[in-house]
Image (cartoon, rainbow, N blue to C red):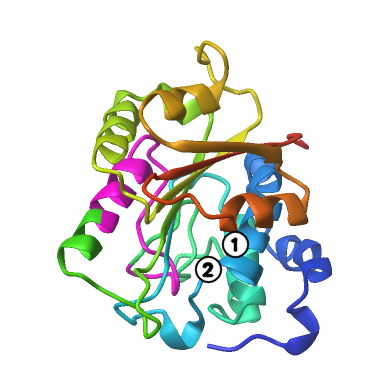
Amino acid sequence: MTTAATLSRYADLPVLIGLMEGDEKHKGAANSTLDVLWVLYDRVLAVTPETAEHPARDRFLLSKGHGPVAFYAVLAAKGFLDVPTLRGWRAFDSPLGHHPDRVLVPGAEIGSGSLGHGLPLALGTALGLRARDVRRPDGAPPRTVVLVGDGELDEGSNHEAITVAGRLRVEELTTVVVDNRSSAHGWPEGIGTRFETEGWISREVDGHDHDALHTALTAPHPGHPLAVIARVRSKR
């Protein structure tokens, strides 16, 4: 699929989001993920509409699936979705719903919205790729990146995945935690410490600073999974 060249820039994302109405209660969730999503698809992930089914593509899993309009807008800007599809996003016959559906949405790797599933699924994806020894043309393994909210880290399934990924040294796995201080319980000494305790490399950045996000996501972390804690201001 293609999108108009005039709606393919970061500056165009508010226009694309504006085409989708009816999910105002999740506006804050969408705004909190927008910059992270843009940096991932614009500067980090090795995946395009043309390679979206290639076995060696990078995988992005959106665990924070509620309020998906930012995700849909970025997919449209990058050509995975046609822009007119956004206008009728909640219609009966639309592929776009309040939660992304991997069967219906080009570029979506999982159906998401039920919190606590994305990180375990991402770990399984990374381990599956490792077991099959999937490689890019340059010989490097593909990355698996999952975006979670700080609140869903209260789910026990995430703690199990964090522990296993650290023990197995799954370097190909990156977790981006969008931290808008919505967690009911939090974690002593901060979110990053929770990952570091289990053998991850942790980096904390301003979740709206594109260069800082890019550096955190691309700097080497040999032999360890990576956690990037993106501090954000939730705009409602």
Q: Main secondary structure of the magenta part?
A: loop
**Type of the residue with mark 1:** Leu
The local crowd at label 2, few if under 14, some if 14 to 19, many if 20 or more residues have their Cα within 10 Å, is: some
| Residue appearing at x 80%, y 70% in the figure | 12
Numbered tag placed on residue 45 in the rendering: 2
Q: Is residue 43 left or right of residue 46?
A: right
Q: Quadrant of residue 119?
A: top left
Check disc 2 and report its element: helix, strand or loop. loop
Q: Is residue 13 above or below residue 152?
A: below
The residues colored magenta run 103-126
112 relative position to 206: left or right: left
Q: Amino acid at mark 2?
A: Leu
User: For mark 1, what is the residue?
Assistant: 40
In the figure, residue 158 lies in which quadrant? top left
Q: Within 10 Å of the Cα at label 1, are there few (<14), some (14-19), or many (20+) other Cα atoms?
A: some
Q: CA distance from mark 2 to mark 1?
A: 6 Å
